[in-house]
Amino acid sequence: MTSKATGSITVTLDGSNKSTSLPLLGGTLGPQVADIRKLYGDLGIFTYDPGYGATASCESTITYIDGDEGVLLYRGYPIEQLAEKSDFLEICYLLLNGELPDKAEYDAFHKGVTYHTMLHEQLKSFFNGFRRDAHPMAIMCGVVGAMAAFYHDNLNINDPEQRRIAAFRLIAKVPTIAAWAYKYSIGQPFLYPRNDLGYAENFLYMLNGVPAEEYVNNPILSRAMDRILILHADHEQNASTSTVRLAGSTGANPFACIAAGIAALWGPAHGGANEAVLKMLAEIGDVKNIPQFISEVKDKNSHTKLMGFGHRVYKNFDPRAKIMKETCHEVLAELGIKDEPLLDMAMEMERIALSDDYFIQRKLYPNVDFYSGIILKAMGIPTSMFTVLFAVARTVGWVSQWKELIEDPSQRIGRPRQIYTGAPARDFVPMDKR
């Protein structure tokens, strides 16, 4: 489905007789969009939009967000319904193909992912090139980018079958890479994936299992991990997704594009937000210190930052946070955690946010990062791995967006404009005369 013309606006350049008509386009949902592509050609001007907060860089049929109403749709399906009734691999199929699979399609897709989870054996040697104390996200960037050297037989991005195989490989192998990055950092042996386990179960097994004893799956924790993956699978044109698309617009191979997305996700303002939540709680130190921390947050002259509350896009409650909150309490109950200081502080912060007028008036509700950080902490996953888990979940979204970009005939290489504010044209002065 493509956007439809819904009208036009006329733009007149002040001080001249130049004007142009810009078409207004409308998608399935959301506001109208002014098509500014001929603005420079007709008027000799272009637009200025730092951060691209008011600029649509592409058409997409994958994900829709209404931040004012707290709505998130994958291919038109509300995230609440998908998190309750679906599993992550079904979501992967949906994001990649546009429709939910029937039983035969699901089984074939499930098998395709399952039988691609093994890594090339030489990649084990590649891990040894990293320092033991390397951040797992550094390892993720390096190893995912290096996949192009190990799986170079399917790098023709213009071949639909090779795109399909690349998608399978990324979705299937990134959890193995993530688990191995963790095992490497703690000096434990790598565990090979198991074909008898589901996607989330297999990931937890590779993270937590050891060769010395049998691994026992906990269905509550596996389901929690599956939900975390579902809720983070895609989120429209965010920084990392835009990075993947920009890299993809050059014709770069999919492994390089996803590695670029991982690098963008690493930033604390993006994928590192749930890690920042736990760092904030650690700095608070104790439940009794929360009132003082809140007063500092409210003080305009203070530089104290509140992490895990509010969202740049959602001006209402983050729909993912509602689901994550329920999952959080399920996990805490399953694990019997009652006296964990960080979790006690988190629950008190949640209580304050839902009752304090300062938070309510500013719509600073706990977001998905707040609850996911608590869940992962409770499950014993170190904070250095939080963003890695985000990358595991978001890989399918990145691959789906990359695939859509490649298949869109209207897409061109990304080339943003700028306002130049440097020195005017000037002549070179020899060094002895400066």
Image (spheres, rainbow, N blue to C red):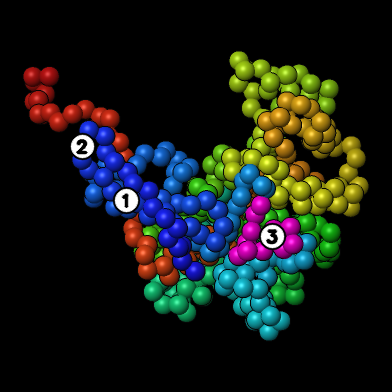
Instruction: Identify the residue position indicated by label 2 in the image.
Output: 16
Magenta stretch bounds: 71-82
Vertical side of 395 occupied by 350: above or below:
above
Q: Position of residue 258 (x, y in %)?
A: 49, 58
Instruction: Identify the residue position indicated by label 3 in the image.
Output: 78
Residue at 79% x, 34% y: name it.
354
User: As shown in the figure, which amino acid type bears the numbered disc 3?
Assistant: Pro
Nearer-N-terminus badge (2/3): 2
Instruction: Identify the residue position indicated by label 1 in the image.
Output: 21
Q: Position of residue 129 (x, y in %)?
A: 50, 53
User: As shown in the figure, which amino acid type bears the numbered disc 1?
Assistant: Ser
Vertical side of 292 occupied by 361: above or below:
below
Vertical side of 171 occupied by 305: above or below:
above
Residue 379 got which mark? Answer: none
Cα–Cα gap, marks 2 and 3: 49 Å
- Please tell me whether mark 2 or mark 3 is closer to you in this view: 2
Magenta segment: does it hold 76? yes
- Please tell me whether mark 3 or mark 1 is closer to you in this view: 1
Could you say which quadrant of the image residue 431 lies in?
top left
